[in-house]
Amino acid sequence: MSPSRASSLEFPGTPSGSLVGLNAALRKSVESALSHGNLFTTHAPFDAPLMDGPLGHEGGGGDEGEEASMLSPLAREPACKGDGSQATWADAVAEIRRLLSLAVPLVLQSMASMLLTLVSTVFVGRLNDAVALGGVVLASSVYNVTGISMVIGLSSALDTLCGQAYGARQYKLLGVYRQRAQLICWTLCLPIAAVWLNAHSLLLAIGQEPAIVDVAARYMHILTPSLFISVVSDTCRRYLLAQRVVVPGMVASIATVRPAGWKGGLLFP
């Protein structure tokens, strides 16, 4: 397509006097694109320099200037720079504070949850009984892999569902989703608890030492009720997190660990 052919563009079916300015502007835009080799890269009917005057050149006026001014708002629409030039340090500091207000309580809550298993292992380790320590570690591993991981995986759907409900201001759905997730997780916990109650024979079947299996089976019997309580804890935590409420979960998790530390200080001064 040559510039001479581009200059002969016409609009059939339209009055000859109504689009004079538009025809001239389009011709000049196409000619400019052809001369610079960017015919297929422009995203607006005019290039920015063409909008400085009535038609991009001096001397334009009359009907042509009025026709061009009708299209100038679209051509003069500012592009998105994306370079962050309008951001300030105050905005960055405020954003960091918002992130830390959510992140710090969540980090402390996760650390407190992990400390529960660590504290139990430390207590048993101070008994200087290798069999008891091996049984507790084995039972804790089975608990984490076959129990709590299932609960966390199922309840993680609340992050999406409760977040969507809270964003859509459908606050009643928050409670509905939490209750349904709790019931679904409890239903899954029933067969898991049945397996744990028969853990002695199952662990022997996979070749574990009988002395360690005796301790591990007893410990898993003790851990069975905590699996159902963990369902309530995790679903409530995600329910509150969707509403950006993180302090209650942090306080509850820390309060669970501290009595264990006091007990350890009494037993092992």
Image: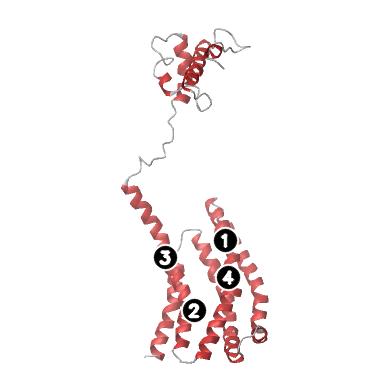
Left of 41 or right of it: where is 195?
A: right
Nearer mark to the viewer, of 1 and 4: 4
**Residue 51: percent from left, percent from top:** 42, 20
Q: Which mark is residue 33?
A: none
Cα separation between marks 3 and 4: 22 Å
**Residue pointed to by mark 3:** 105
**Residue 61: percent from left, percent from top:** 42, 9
**Residue 124: percent from left, percent from top:** 48, 87
**Residue 203: percent from left, percent from top:** 64, 84
Q: Earlier in the sequence, mark 1 or mark 3?
A: 3
Q: Nearer the viewer, residue 148 or 256?
A: 148
Q: Amino acid at mark 2?
A: Thr
Q: Amino acid at mark 4?
A: Ser
Contact check, label 2 and label 1, Cβ < 8 Å: no
**Residue pointed to by mark 2:** 117
Q: Earlier in the sequence, mark 2 or mark 1?
A: 2
Q: Amino acid at mark 1?
A: Leu
Q: How are the colours assigned in the image?
A: secondary structure
**Residue pointed to by mark 1:** 158
Q: Earlier in the sequence, mark 3 or mark 4?
A: 3
Nearer mark to the viewer, of 2 and 1: 2
Residue drawn at 57 percent across, 61 percent down: 158
Please tell me how crowded label 2 is: few (under 14), some (14-19), or many (20+) other residues with Cα within 10 Å.
some
Report helix, strand or loop for mark 2.
helix
Left of 32 or right of it: where is 199?
A: right
Contact check, label 3 and label 4, Cβ < 8 Å: no
Contact check, label 2 and label 3, Cβ < 8 Å: no
Judge whether 193 appears above or below 77 on screen. Answer: below
